[in-house]
Image (cartoon, helix red, strand yellow):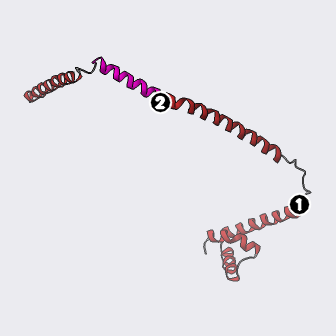
Amino acid sequence: MNCATVKEWMPHYIEGTLSPEMELNLRLHIEACPGCSSWLEEARALSALWNEMEAGLETPEPWDFPDITNDVMEHIGQLEAGRRERAVRATAARRRTAPGTSWMHYGVAVGLTFLLLQFGVFENLAYGITEINGQMSTSVTAWFNAQGSHK
């Protein structure tokens, strides 16, 4: 048996709640080990001190604590009512403005797109993109050709 096991079972050894075989094994180890022997002495002294304290305590009379349950529950109710009121106000305001705002944005976007199409803003867009694409491919081809000649 090792010291860790003995220290683990020491409270049961002091109380006398171990089986006779286990108690014998612990006692043999404690007699052979000075560290566990001093541990047992300290544990017994602490146990005696604890028992003295418990014996010296009188059964206290019930204390008269004020009942604050009703006050606390009333305060919780007020907090909850305030939270609900704030939540309803915020939700109602959001319901009133959010859908109208989103439809208004879509309406403005559609109207602007229609106006731009009517005025021909996008008429030369395809030509401009083709022109830019051609210039880019010419410059990239020239750059690659220049890089190839340096090698």
Please tell me the numbered disc located at residue 23. Answer: none
The residue wearing badge 1 is: 57
Q: Residue at x 65, y 75 (%)?
A: 29
The relative height of residue 21 versus residue 40 in the rendered view (above or below) is: below
Which of disc 1 and disc 2 is earlier in sequence?
1
Q: Where, by quadrant of the figure, is residue 95 drawn?
A: top right
* Local SS, label 2: helix
Q: Quadrant of the C terminus?
A: top left
Crowd around label 1: few <14 · some 14–19 · many ≥20 (10 Å): few
Q: Say which of 81 and 105 sits in front.
A: 105
Please tell me the numbered disc located at residue 102. Answer: 2
Q: Residue at x 38, y 26 (%)?
A: 110
The relative height of residue 118 versus residue 36 in the rendered view (above or below) is: above
Q: Quadrant of the N terminus?
A: bottom right
**Residue 142 appears left or right of 3:** left
The relative height of residue 84 versus residue 134 in the rendered view (above or below) is: below
**Where is residue 86 drawn, in percent x and y?**
66, 34
Outermost bottom residue = 21
Outermost top residue = 119
**Where is residue 129 drawn, in percent x and y?**
21, 24
Q: Which residues are magenta?
A: 104-120
**Residue 94 appears left or right of 148:** right
